[in-house]
Image: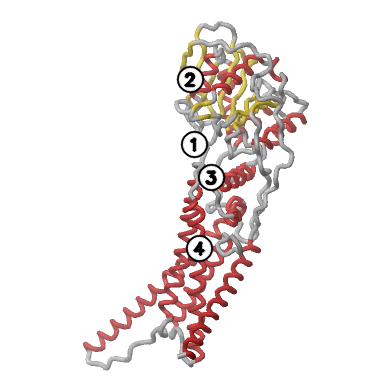
Amino acid sequence: MGTDVDRHVGRSYRVAASTALGVLILAVLGAVMGPQWDPVPLADPLLVETSSTAIGSAAAVPEYDVRTSVVTVRLDGATVEAQISEPVGLDDPKPGVVFVHGAGTGRFDTAFLEQAHALAASGIVAMVPNKRLDTYTTRHRDYVLMAADYEASVEVLQAYPGVDPDRVGIYAESEGGWIAPVMAAQDPSIAFVVLVSSPVVPPREQAAFAVDSYLRNTGVPHGVFRAIPRAVGMSLPGGGFEYADFDVTPFQREMRQPVFVVYGTGDASMPVIQGAVQVIQDTAVAGNGDVTVRYYEGANHGIRVDGQVDATFLRDLSGWVLGLPATADAAPRIAGAQPVQTYVAAPVPEPRWFGDGDVVLALAITSVALIVLGPLAVLVARSVEEATDRVRRRRGAAVTVAGPRFARGVLPRLILLGAGAILTVLGLVWYIVAVARLALDYQRNDLVVQGGWVVVRVLGIAVVVVGILLLRRCRRISLAGGVPAPGIVRTSVLWAGVIGSVVLLVILAYWGVFQLGI
């Protein structure tokens, strides 16, 4: 009895030791296959001069009734409609503003409604064109060509009755911050530039910065951050996304217009300090010191607080535009709520092994196919054998002994290995999607974030255990003179299932499932 217990304990110990070794190998492999994520802390904070956002000595903002109309703007190869909001009862030549959409907006009837109305009510003609969409997709977009499209709207507004053509500027939000500097650099007639929640850094850097910020807010385990450079740094399956590395710096260094830089301190997606500093430094290259920076307490990416565009921001925006050129260099230059940016938005390390998204996807699909098609091949083989036996019986011929079968205990372990590997991959995909949703909604859920990661890692370790058990079973059968998988079909099925499962385990290791620590 004692001998049996000792033998069982010994087997359990060897399985546990082999599993630990397997997990360690996968952890090391996952660590060396791709870049780590170690963002640099922002060491030099940007200090506001005063909490008041009032723009210099700008006069009180007047208030007019607002009239809207829709015009057609002809582009190169297309047309778009634009809504013009203008003050009623003001006969003097008026300044004008053309709005440049961000990634989340595109139509004048849903975007910039409050901003355009506030500008028009203060005596400024506001024009919101629809975004051109026939050349704008998730995979393909060209910011220089988009700048040319928006330039057509600038020309329309400059020629609009009652507008002073020398006082027409542009208001760009979010993604528009990569477009407006191109327009300003290429068209000196643009009178001023308003950059609201501008990314400033290239899209790939901003995406990594935003994901890092969102994940920290969600409270994910430290190991999950490894996925940032591996996901953001690789080329995505199907190609495209060339704009991910677009650098707006050369264009900002040619901007000579007054610039109004605006951020909300509640915007975790943008490098709010780094962005303002870079705009100041870039425009200085062109000898332009007319940069005004404002931060609004608790405002989000759209400078909204509790769903409404910050009223103080709308007042400051109108005052700054109406007060130009006097407000271009009015003190204080940097004011409002004190911004906080913990880490620097920097270039994203490029994955060494899995940098090509098409390769990663092909490997995963091929591995799943190897795992799934193997058992199907066995079923087909058995069906052929049974059909052959039935034919022989009908003919009165002797029925041969059943064909080769997997050795006892091999097939169940093989199926469990493949199914477990696929299930773990699906679990990882579910976890990433769930965390992404929480992050984008600025929500925390420890059950999903912490518990989900534990479940995925436990599943991964369980698959390694099954793999060890399969390996040990095949070894014992071989040492006893048997064959784990007799016949070409079954040998192929065994190797296909093992290879497919191992590749999936390596992919899981790449994404940090087996890394040491939490």
Q: Quadrant of the N terminus?
A: bottom left
Mark 2 packing: few (<14 Cα in 10 Å), some, or many (20+)?
some
Nearest the viewer among 78 and 93 is: 93
Query: In the image, what residue occupies the spot 49% across and 36% down?
Result: 134
The image quadrant of residue 251 is: top right
Residue 150, percent across and down?
Answer: 57, 28
Query: In the image, what residue occupies the spot 62% across and 21% down?
Result: 169
Q: Which mark is residue 134?
A: 1
Nearest the viewer among 310 and 146 is: 310
Name the residue type under label 3.
Arg
Disc 2 marks which residue? Answer: 71
In the displayed structure, 205 sits above or below 320; it is: below
In the displayed structure, 140 sits above or below 372; it is: above
Disc 4 marks which residue? Answer: 364
Callout 1–callout 3 Cβ contact below 8 Å = no
Q: Quadrant of the C terminus?
A: bottom right
Could you tell which of marks 4 and 3 lies nearer the N-terminus? 3
Query: In the image, what residue occupies the spot 54% across and 28% down?
Result: 75
Residue 207, percent across and down?
Answer: 59, 44
User: What separation in Å lies between label 4 and label 3 (alpha carbons)?
Assistant: 22 Å
Callout 4–callout 3 Cβ contact below 8 Å = no
Nearest the viewer among 200 and 57 is: 57
The answer to whether residue 469 is visible is: yes
User: What separation in Å lies between label 1 and label 3 (alpha carbons)?
Assistant: 13 Å
User: What separation in Å lies between label 1 and label 4 (alpha carbons)?
Assistant: 33 Å
Disc 3 marks which residue? Answer: 139
Could you tell which of marks 2 and 1 lies nearer the N-terminus? 2
Local SS, label 2: strand
